[in-house]
Image (tube, rainbow, N blue to C red):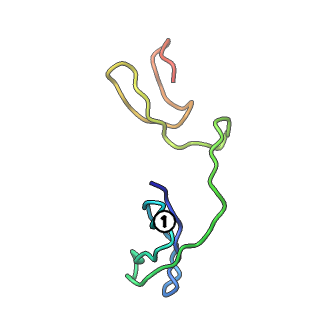
Amino acid sequence: MRRYDFECEMCGERFDVERPTAEAGAPAACPFCGEPARRVFTAPRFLFKGDPTENRPVWHNHGAFGHAHAPRRGHHPPGIDE
């Protein structure tokens, strides 16, 4: 499912909702005040693998030990790749 951005006309809060594409344009209840909110269109969010500012945790598994940490920021024993 995709995430869509919404803005509440009553309180002005912006939030996102995960829903099926068929329901993308339907109003969503504001999680802050409960009033109906309308969908707003924003620029797509792209993630480039070589982006040096990317620091979201990455989940990976070494044998039976799975964990998450920021790219190139984990501490592993020598010989274990991130």
- The relative height of residue 68 versus residue 3 in the rendered view (above or below) is above
Which residue corresponds to the image point at 46% horizontal and 64% vertical from the top-left? 22
In the rendered image, the residue lying farthest to the front is 22
Q: Nearer the viewer, residue 65 or 43?
A: 43
Residue that numbered label 1 is attached to? 16
Using the image, determine if residue 58 lies above or below residue 15.
above
Residue at (52%, 78%) from the top-left corner?
A: 38
Q: Which of 69 and 15 is in front in this view?
A: 15
Residue lying furthest top:
79
> Where's residue 78, x and y in %?
49, 13
Q: Where is residue 48 in the image (x, y as percent from the top left)?
A: 66, 41
* Label 1 element class: strand
Left or right: residue 49 versus residue 15 is right
Label 1 neighbour load within 10 Å: few <14, some 14-19, many 20+: some
The image position of residue 9, as x and y in percent, is 52, 85
Query: Taking 48 as reference, is 24 left or right?
Result: left
- The quadrant the N terminus occupies is bottom left
> Of 39 and 12, which appears nearest the observer?
39
Q: In this picture, is 11 found above or below 68?
A: below
Number of dots carrying numbers? 1
Q: Residue furthest bottom?
A: 10
- Tell me where residue 63 appears, x and y as whole percent: 36, 18
Q: Identity of the amino acid at label 1?
A: Asp
Apparent side of residue 50 relative to residue 64 in the rendered image (left or right): right
Residue drawn at point x = 40 percent, y = 26 percent = 61
Give the residue displayed 50% in from the left and 80% down from the top. 8
